Image (cartoon, rainbow, N blue to C red):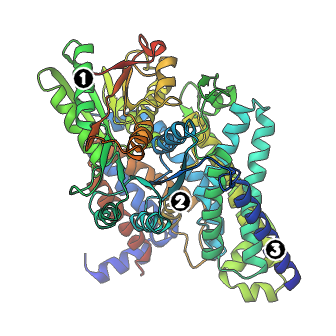
Amino acid sequence: MKKLLFTILVVSLASLVCVVGCSRKTPASDADSPVKYKIGMSQCNLGEPWRVQMNADVKNAAEEYSEIEVIFKDAQNDTLKQRSHMEEFISAGVDIIIISPKESVPLVPIISQAYKNGIPVIILDRKIIGDDYTCFIGADNIEIGKAAGKWIAANLQGKGKVIELKGLMTTIAGQDRNSGFRQGIKDSDIEIIFEADMKWLEPNARKEMESALSRFEKIDLVYAHNDPGAHGAYLAAKAAGREKEIKFVGIDGLPQEGQIYVKQGVLAATFEYPTGGREAIEAALKLLAGQEVPKKITLPSKIYTPENIDQGGQHLK
Amino acid sequence: MTGNDLKSFTDKNQWLLSPTARALGALIIVFAMGLIFNADGAFLKWGTHRDMLRAVSVYGILACGMTIVIITGGIDLSVGSILALSAVSFSLMAIHFAMNPILAIIICLLIGTACGCSSGLLIGKYSVQPFIATLAMMVFGRGLAKWVSGGQKISTAVQQADGTYQYVEVPKVFDFVNSKVFADNITVVTLILIVCLVISWVLLTKLRQGRYIYAIGGNEEAARLSGVPVLSSKILTYGLSGLFCGIAGICQACQELQGDPEAGVAYELSAIAMVVIGGTSLKGGRGGIWLTLIGILTIGYLEKILSINAVGEDKRLMLTGAIIIAAVLLQKTRK
C-alpha cells in the first residue's frame, strides 16, 4: 500500500511539473530576447468573464510590442493575495504595475509604497482612495446606466412597464448601474414593476424572471445589469412563449456574449463596459518612453443594437 | 396547550411524530405562506409551481446523491464543482465538437462517476475523512473545469482562428432538456429529477446494497464485523453522487445554453440544506429519499414565494436561515 501511495504521489507531482512546464512556453528568458521592460499585471478575479476579457485585451495589445513582457497574476477575489502580488512585483523590480484592484481601500498602502518607490502604477476599472498612483483608467457605470435609461425611455416612447434585474446591490457596479438608470428614466413615465437581485448570475436571473412572468400579464422591457442576466431573462420568457412581446437590454457588450446576443436578436441593445486593457498598455508604453499620461482616463462606452452591430457599434455621446 | 396536553395529544396521534409528518410540517407552513402572500394570485397558477420545480431540479438531483452519502455518515462537498466540470465538458463536446449527444452524455456521466469514485476510494481505502477528501475534490474539480474551458464560458459563440466569434446553432439535445412536456405542464429537467429520486429510492429500500449503506451509517465497525463490504459500498455511494452530479451538470448546461466553469458554486450547501430539512440525520444511518423530496419542495417553495413577492436579498437570506432553523427544530421535538 505504501508503494501505491508513493506511485500516486510521484505521478501527481510529475503531472504538476508537466502542467506548469507546458504553461511556460514563451521563450522570454532567452539571452537574445528583445524584452527590455517587464510589466506586472494583477487581476482581482479571473472568475468573471469580463475580467478574463480584460486580461486578453492586455495580452493582445502587449503582443504587438516585442520590447515588453507582461507577467499576469490572479488574486482569485482575495484582497490579501492581491497585496502579495504587489509585494512580489516590487521585489522583482518590474518597470510598471497594472492593477485592477478588488477593493478601493485596503490596497492603498501597498500601491502607495510601489508608487513612492518610483514604479508607475496604472489602476484599471476600480478607483482607489487617495492620489498615490500614476494613472486611473476606467469607464463610468453611472453614465452607462443613464445612457441605458435614456435609450430605454426613447425606445418605449417614454412609457412602459419595465423589470430591473440588478447585479448585486452591495457592489459599486450594481449601485451605479441602478442609480444611473433611475436618473436616465426620471423624466419619463417608465414604471419599474418588479426588481430583484440576480447576483450577476444567469440561473438566478432566469428564476427571478419566471416569477415576474407569472405575476405580470404585461411586461414591455427587461433591463439587466449584465448581459448574462438579460439572457437568463430571455430564456425564461422564451420558455413561457412571451419572448416576442418583451425587449431585453443588458450591459457589458463582450464580443462572445452581449454582442453575439444582439446578433442573434436576443437583446434589443447592450451597452459596452470597456475593459481598458489595450489603453493600459498604451499608457504603459508612453510612460516607458518618458511621456506624460493624464491622471484619469475615462473610457468611452458603446451601444450595440441589431442595426449597428455589423458596423461595430456606436459610441455614446 | 400545556406540555401535558401536547403529550397526550401526540400519544393519541403517533403518526404526528413520524419523521415524514415532521418534515411535512415545515413544507405546509411554507406552502401556507405562499397562499397568504400569493403576489396578486401568481402563486395560485400552475405555471408558478412548474417553474419552481424547474428551478429546484438541479439542486434536487444533487440532493439525491447527497442523501445517500449522508446516510453513510459522510458528506460530499464536491457536488458543485463536479457539476461545473460536467457542464463545461458537455458543452464543449456537444456545441464545439458537435459530437453525438448520446456519446457526450455518456462521457460526462463517466467523468462525474470517476470523480465520485476517486473520493470514495480515498475515504474507504485510505480512511481520509469525507469532509477532507471531498473538499480536495471540490477544489481540484473546480480547477479542472476552468482548465478544460480555458476559464471562459463554453457557449454557442465559438472563437475562430482570427480571434473573432462565430455563432453556431444550439444542439437539439439542449432544446430537448430545456423543454416542457405533457402539454407544457412539466419540464424535462423535473422528470430527470423524478428518475433520480426513483433510482435512489430503489437503491436505498429495495436492494441489499441499500441495507449496507444504512448499516455503515449506523455503526461502521459493526457493519464491517458483520461482513458488510464497506470499501465497495463507499465507492458506490460516492460514485453514485458523482453520477448525479454529472446528470445535474448536463441539465445545468442545457438550461443555460452554455457550460459555465463558475456554475454550481455553493450548490453543495443548498443540497445539504434540502437533505437536513427533510430530516435525514447528518450522523448517518437514518433518513430517506422521500424526506429529501420534502426538503427539496420546502426550499423550492420558500425561494419561489420570496421571488414572486420581490423580497429584497437581505430579507431573503434572513428568512431562509430562519426557516432552516424552524424546520430542524420541528425535527427535534420529542414526546
Co-location on one chain, circles 3 and 1: yes
Distance from disc 3 to disc 1, alpha carbons, whole Å, reads: 63 Å
Residue type, label 3: Val
Question: Chain under label 3?
Answer: A
- Asked if residue B63 shows in the view, the reply is yes
Q: Residue at x 50, y 31 (%)?
A: A257
- Residue A180 x, y percent position in the rendering: 21, 34
Q: Is residue B327 left or right of A56 when viewed as pictured? A: left
Q: How many marks?
A: 3
Q: Nearer the viewer, residue A144 or A63?
A: A63
Q: Write down the residue under mark 2.
A: B271
Where does the C terminus of chain B fall, quadrant-wise? bottom left
Q: Write down the residue under mark 3.
A: A10
Q: Residue at x 33, y 62 (%)?
A: A111
Residue type, label 1: Lys
Co-location on one chain, circles 3 and 2: no
Q: Write down the residue under mark 1.
A: A161
- Residue B41 x, y percent position in the rendering: 30, 34
Against B76, is A189 above or below? Answer: above
Co-location on one chain, circles 2 and 1: no
Q: Residues within 10 Å of mark 2 (few under 14, many from 20)?
A: many
Q: Nearer the viewer, residue B308 or A292?
A: A292
